[in-house]
Image (cartoon, helix red, strand yellow):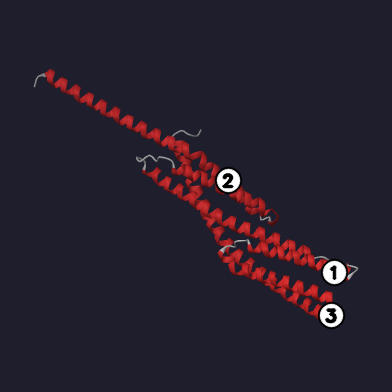
Amino acid sequence: MPKKIILILSLLFLLLSIVSCAKGMERNSVRTENIVAYLKNIGPDFEESIASFKMFDNEYAADNSDQLDELVDTIRHSKETFEKNLNNVNSQIVPTSADKLKAFHASLTGYYNDGIKLLEQYEEIAVYSSEIIKITESVEKAASEDIGSLPSLEEVKTLIKGMKSSIDESIVAIQQINPPDYLAYSHNDFLEVMEQFSIASENLIFALQLVDPLRLNASQYRFDVLANKMIRIGDDMDRDLESRMAKIDDMGKEFLQVQEKLYKQLLIWQGEYRLVQ
């Protein structure tokens, strides 16, 4: 074969190699750009979710029953953040050339879904506890008045009527509350006792109108029985809540472990693609 032909063929092979290499570099460049774009899109949202959950976790750890309404607001804000960021993650195009990134994306989607479910359980308990506390405080305030300090029977009857009105309002409020499934029985027992308190209050008013010592003693006995029953129901509620909260807290610990693992992986990729200093 003439030397010129050999030289031409060599040049052609070299040219083909250069073109192939250029195409490979172009594909790598596009793949890198896609990965960088994905990481830039999901990174800030993930960090926002971490901060949002931490804010809730700090308030929850404070265990302040006087600020349950504030805790509910924080939970709902965190849940809205997770829902927003889940929608953003679902809208992302995941680079198909990076298997590890696809697995990370699936785990991140699961993280957001699990976070929303977890926050919903905390919200359910916080809302229910807040409503029940308001109801019991209202009734306790009405029942704490010192009847013995009132100078006349009419004032005593007025006080009892006020207490019954407070109880009846509480009954309406209890009926409007949707309790968690695991508290349904205790909730219904609580409602039943409150209805019995209303009847007992009405009987007491009638006894006062008649000035009947026997009826008054019977009313006092009935109030004592109902008060003891209410204490037992409260203890049952507390026990059921504590048991449920222990399970949810364990779920929360597992959730934070997943969060830490995902965040570490994100930081590695951000460093690899020079997205962080």
Looking at marks 2 and 1 on the same chain, the residue that comes earlier in the sequence is marked by: 2
| Residue 97, above or below 177 | above
Circle 2 is placed at which residue position? Answer: 52
Question: Percent x, y for residue 135?
Answer: 70, 61
Question: Percent x, y for residue 206?
Answer: 80, 75
Residue pictured at 56% horizontal, 53% vertical: 119
Q: Looking at the picture, which amino acid does disc 2 mark? A: Ser
Looking at marks 2 and 3 on the same chain, the residue that comes earlier in the sequence is marked by: 2
Asked if residue 5 lies left or right of residue 230, the reply is: left
* Picture quarter with the N terminus: top left
Question: Percent x, y for residue 253?
Answer: 54, 55
Closer to the camera in the image, 163 or 21: 163
- Asked if disc 2 and disc 1 are in contact, CB closer than 8 Å, the reply is no
Residue pictured at 79% horizontal, 67% vertical: 161
Element type at marker 2? Answer: helix
Badge number at residue 171:
none
| Residue 21, above or below 141 | above
Farthest residue to the right: give it: 151
Circle 1 is placed at which residue position? Answer: 156
Circle 3 is placed at which residue position? Answer: 213
Q: Dot 3, how many residues are within 10 Å of its Cα: few (below 14), some (14-19), or many (20+)?
A: few
Q: From mark 2 to mark 1, how far is it between C-alphas?
A: 52 Å
Looking at marks 1 and 3 on the same chain, the residue that comes earlier in the sequence is marked by: 1
Q: Dot 1, how many residues are within 10 Å of its Cα: few (below 14), some (14-19), or many (20+)?
A: some
